Image (cartoon, rainbow, N blue to C red):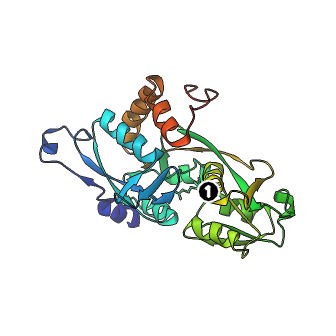
């Protein structure tokens, strides 16, 4: 009963004026709400000058939707709210540098992987923490609902401080209120390059490999068409173009096109 009510309440779909002329189950021309975050650079962030969302994920899903023939509108929220909203069936699509994990796959469908990631420790330049083996009893920051938060809980005896926004962890680390932070490699590297140079550094190995996938409501009819669109973007170089725009280099060819 509860799941039925959730399904009925799941109104992430609005039909366009001409949507009714499409056959049942046809996504073409419909508008879907894409749940995203507003502060996970360089995947999604608010351009404070224009007030628009920007980032790798935003460009990626915009082009996917165009190729697959559906319309999208964005709604941004905290990452753990996004997870809960997706799992409750409130949104048809979610893109937020979300790692594909077996637990999440129980309640969500994922696209093919679109970015190879992992998690890594960030510490002050002069820290004596050299790897994850040194964090027991230390204050380590992360983000609520993230794979890093689970990793810390499952594999260490650190005092975990998980915040709704990862920047709070980064700021507290920079101000000496935390001993370290654990989070996604590209986001940590981006932060160090932009704001942490000479003060913060990564340390130790990448702790677990993770692949980002676009999340869909379980059973969504958009998965196949979206995957096809993404594959076509990988083949024709559009993916590489978007990648270079946000990461300043071409993607490695070690995983792309493997599918
Ligand atoms: N990749 C990590 C996870 O899936 C963190 C993602 C955080 N993304 C965000 N938009 N804040 O748990």
Above or below, comparing residue 222 to residue 189 in the picture: above
Q: Is residue 121 above or below residue 65?
A: below
Residue 117 spot, x, y in % from top left:
63, 44
What percent of the width, then of the height, locates residue 97? Answer: 53, 50
Horizontal side of residue 237 vs 184, given as left or right: left
Q: Depth check: give the residue in front, 218 or 178.
A: 178
Q: Which residue is mark 1?
A: 191
Nearest the eye: 107 or 239: 239
Residue at the extreme front: 198
Left or right of 214 in this view: 186: right
- Residue 198 is situated, as x and y percent measured from the top left of the image, at 73, 58
Q: Quadrant of ligand 1?
A: bottom right
Nearer to the camera, 203 or 258: 203
Q: Residue at x 73, y 72 (%)?
A: 178
Q: Looking at the figure, which quarter contains the C terminus?
A: top right
Asked if 92 appears above or below 250 in the picture, the reply is: below
Hey, which quadrant is residue 164 in on the image? bottom right
Q: Residue at x 47, y 64 (%)?
A: 84
The image position of residue 43, as x and y in percent, is 50, 49
Dot 1 crowding, Cα within 10 Å, few <14, some 14–19, many 20+: some
Is the residue at mark 1 in contact range of ligand 1, meaning its CB lies under 8 Å from it?
no
Q: Point out the image quarter for the N terminus.
A: bottom left
Q: Nearer the viewer, residue 201 or 36?
A: 201
Mark 1 residue element: helix
């Amino acid at each position: 009963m509860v799941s039925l009510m959730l399904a009925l309440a799941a109104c992430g779909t609005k039909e366009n004026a001409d949507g009714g002329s499409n056959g049942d189950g046809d996504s073409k021309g419909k508008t879907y709400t894409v749940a995203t975050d507003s502060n996970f650079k360089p995947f999604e962030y608010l351009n404070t000058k224009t007030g628009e969302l920007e980032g790798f994920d935003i460009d990626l899903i915009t082009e996917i939707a165009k190729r697959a023939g559906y319309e999208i509108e964005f709604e941004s929220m905290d990452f753990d709210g996004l997870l809960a909203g997706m799992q409750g069936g409130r949104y048809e699509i979610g893109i937020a540098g979300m790692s594909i994990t077996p637990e999440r796959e129980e309640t969500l469908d994922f696209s093919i992987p679109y970015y190879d990631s992992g998690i890594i420790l960030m510490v002050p330049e002069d820290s004596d923490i050299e790897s994850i083996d040194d964090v027991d009893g230390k204050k380590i920051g992360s983000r609520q609902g993230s794979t890093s938060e689970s990793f810390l809980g499952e594999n260490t005896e650190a005092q975990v401080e998980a915040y709704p926004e990862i920047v709070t962890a980064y700021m507290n680390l920079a101000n000496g209120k935390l001993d370290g932070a654990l989070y996604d490699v590209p986001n940590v590297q981006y932060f160090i390059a932009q704001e942490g140079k000479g003060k913060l550094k990564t340390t130790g190995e990448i702790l677990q490999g993770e692949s980002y996938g676009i999340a869909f409501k379980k059973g969504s009819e958009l998965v196949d068409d979206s995957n096809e669109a993404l594959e076509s973007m990988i083949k024709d170089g559009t993916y590489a173009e978007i990648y270079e725009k946000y990461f300043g280099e071409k993607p490695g060819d070690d995983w792309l096109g493997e599918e």
